[in-house]
Image: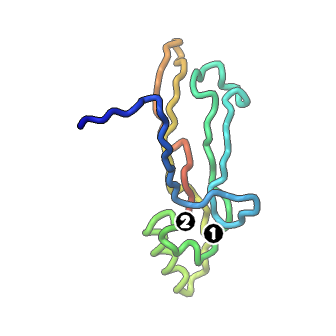
Amino acid sequence: PLQTRDPTARTPHRVHRRGVDCGADSRMCCRQEFFVDFKEIGWEDWIIQPEGYHMNYCSGLCPMHMAGVPGLAASFHTAVLNRIKAASAAAAVDSCCVPTQRRPLSLLYYDRDSNIVKTDIPDMIVDSCGCT
């Protein structure tokens, strides 16, 4: 039998995020939510939609033991490199908390000739963070 679904009915869905969101007392590398309001930065006259967006950023500490963990490192390459650094006699270099996953931002805006343009700007939204 053929089944139809009511298009107005909402079905709950889960959003799976990799990485850690910052809490009130987070000290380790995490994703900090940050909303940019285009009106506050004076761009509301040329950006039609959205009115702002969650750009987010990464902050926090990256001790050597965290940088060596592939799930928390920016890449497997970084994890291996940090293991080598930790095992060598060379001076330890601090690791940095950086974006590991980003996504584009869709913008509707007026160009210089007052045409309405829709574009996707890559890497504008930070989804997760890790250690370099």
* Left or right: 63, with 110 as reference point: right
- Give the residue displayed 33% in from the left and 32% down from the top: 4
- Give the secondary structure at mark 1: loop
Numbered tag placed on residue 62 in the rendering: 1
Q: Which quarter of the rendering shows the C terminus?
A: bottom right
If you read the primary sequence from the N terminus, does the residue marked by circle 1 or circle 2 appear first?
1
Residue furthest front in the image: 1
Please determine whether, in this image, residue 97 is positioned above or below residue 112: below
Q: Nearer the viewer, residue 89 or 16?
A: 16
- Give the residue displayed 37% in from the left and 33% down from the top: 5
Residue furthest left in the image: 1
What amino acid type is highlighted by mark number 1? Answer: Cys
Contact? badges 1 and 2 (CB < 8 Å): yes
Residue 125 position by quadrant: top right
Q: Position of residue 104 (x, y in %)?
A: 49, 40
Q: Position of residue 91 (x, y in %)?
A: 61, 80
Circle 2 residue:
132
- Give the residue displayed 25% in from the left and 35% down from the top: 2
- Give the secondary structure at mark 2: loop
